[in-house]
Amino acid sequence: MTGIETTLPFGKFVMQHEAFITANFDTKFIEKYFSPDLLEKASEGSSQVAAFASGQIFYQNENKQNLVQNAGEKSNWFLKRKDS
């Protein structure tokens, strides 16, 4: 699954890095700590989570549509009731 490329994975990498958290960094942060394959490894799991989440959303929307479509139908209980 692919989509729009953003800098969010890079931002997440920076924000979670120990040097950034402890304020122990300088203008050489990228040269010292970053390589693109670090983001590729981290994004593999994200793609799987995104695929699962989109499947769940689709499934839930399908169920909602079925409920709405069936809302106007009278139930067997209603049809078999005894009018007093």
Image (cartoon, grey):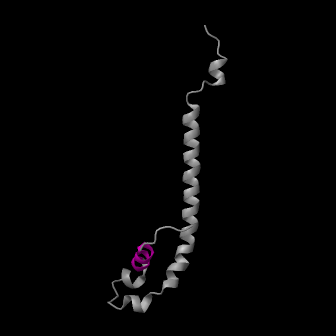
Which quadrant of the figure has residue 9? bottom left
Residue appearing at x 50%, y 79% in the figure: 39
Q: Quadrant of residue 50?
A: bottom right
Based on the picture, tell me whether residue 45 belongs to the magenta stretch.
no
**In this rendering, position of residue 37 left or right of residue 23:** right
Q: Is residue 11 magenta?
A: yes
Q: For the point 58% across and 60% down, which residue is it?
A: 52
What is the total number of numbered labels drawn onto the structure image? 0
Vertical order, 57 against 26 (above or below): above
- Of the 4 image quadrants, the one containing the C terminus is top right
Name the chief secondary structure element in magenta: helix
Q: Residue at x 35, y 92 (%)?
A: 28
Range of magenta residues: 7-15
The structure residue drawn at horizontal position 53% and vertical position 76%, both measured from the top left corner, is: 42
Where's residue 29, x and y in %?
A: 37, 88
Q: Quadrant of residue 7?
A: bottom left
Q: Is residue 13 above or below residue 25?
A: above
Residue 64: x and y in percent read 55, 41
Q: Report the side of 72 relative to 34 (left or right).
A: right
Above or below residue 47? Residue 79 is above
- Pinpoint residue 37: horizontal percent, then vertical percent: 52, 84
Can you give x and y, in whole percent of width and height, for residue 49 in the image?
A: 56, 64
Q: Image quadrant for the N terminus?
A: bottom right
Residue nearer the viewer, 57 or 22: 57
Q: Residue furthest top?
A: 84
